[in-house]
Image: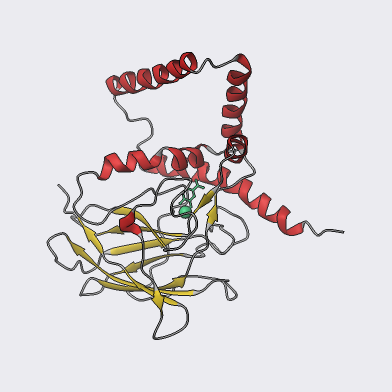
Amino acid sequence: MTDISFDTEVTAKAAESGANASARFRERMETAGRAGVVDTARVDHLASKVIKAINDIVIEDQVSYAEYNALKAWLIKVGEDGEWPLFLDVWLEHSVEEVASAHREGSKGTIEGPYYLDGSPELGWNGTIPMRDDEPGTPLLFSGQVRAVDGTPLTGAKIELWHADDLGFYSQFAPGLPEWNLRGTWIANEDGRFEIHTLRPAPYQIPTDGACGQLIAAAGWHAWRPAHLHFKVSAPGYELITTQLYFPGDPHNDDDIASAVKPELMLDPRDNPAGEGVAVDYDFVLDPES
Ligand code: DHB
Ligand code: FE
């Protein structure tokens, strides 16, 4: 008999991540008091444009009732599966990020994705990320400096890191992981420097068992994102950057489903001379707030 318990567990976790991502997003918007604050003229302009673009596609591509009904059923399922955050962050956020960061001179950013949480444990300037005793993965020593575009080191800058475990799961979204597993906050020292002790992340597949997975399968696409580390880097008086960093040689660097890879975000890891695993340097450069 085939043992399917592992697959069942993985599938159950994937389904839950979507629902948690929706709930967390709603809470964050409510806390920030930012839900629904787009002005009427802008809503009129943008909603009219979106509706027209879709109608134009229907006419141009001669969309049938069978296709219209398949779309309707799928849109209902995206909501039921809690996968709107997933869908939007994978297929739309990259353009929004491009618009938002076009003016910046400092380090490049990229999408946040659905799995950020604020308030992760503070680990000094050189601490080790919270992880399980038997956490699988290669040790990664990530060092660098936070500075302003004019070169000033930013003492006290905050570096928040979150990443998936070896199976592609994020703590507090997939069940069964310690609360802050693979999430932490470092505070840059007097030279703006920090040293993060973590694990090298594995390539990641967006959940395939919900509506987004159904679309991917129906269109013959794949669900992979290259292995990545997520960061938010901030300091008072400077623009916060949300970014992700990637590893050379990953098979999905060139076809990330979320279109979030940029050449400037590629790390250059080397064998760690001082210990096990790999070491890498990367500096974050922040723009002053305007
Ligand atoms: C998704 C997950 C990620 O880890 C990420 O970085 C971007 C998007 C997602 O599942 O939508
Ligand atoms: Fe991610």
**Residue at horizontal 12%, vertical 61%?**
150
Foreground residue among 48 and 24: 48
Q: Visible in this render: residue 172?
A: no
**Residue at horizontal 29%, vertical 25%?**
39
Q: Position of residue 119 (x, y in %)?
A: 40, 59
Q: Visible in this render: residue 185?
A: yes
Q: Position of residue 254 (x, y in %)?
A: 43, 51
Question: Where on the picture, by quarter, is residue 3?
Answer: bottom right
Question: Where on the picture, by quarter, is residue 280?
Answer: bottom left
**Residue at horizontal 59%, vertical 15%?**
64
Give the number of callouts.
0
Foreground residue among 122 and 256: 256
**Residue at horizontal 39%, vertical 43%?**
31
Answer above or below: position of 19 versus 62. below
Foreground residue among 287 and 236: 287
Q: Quadrant of the N terminus?
A: bottom right
Answer above or below: position of 259 versus 198. above
Foreground residue among 185 and 63: 63
Q: Position of residue 195 (x, y in %)?
A: 34, 74
Query: Which residue is situated farthest in the right direction here?
Result: 1
Question: Where on the picture, by quarter, is residue 266?
Answer: bottom left
Query: Which residue is situated farthest in the bottom direction here?
Result: 274
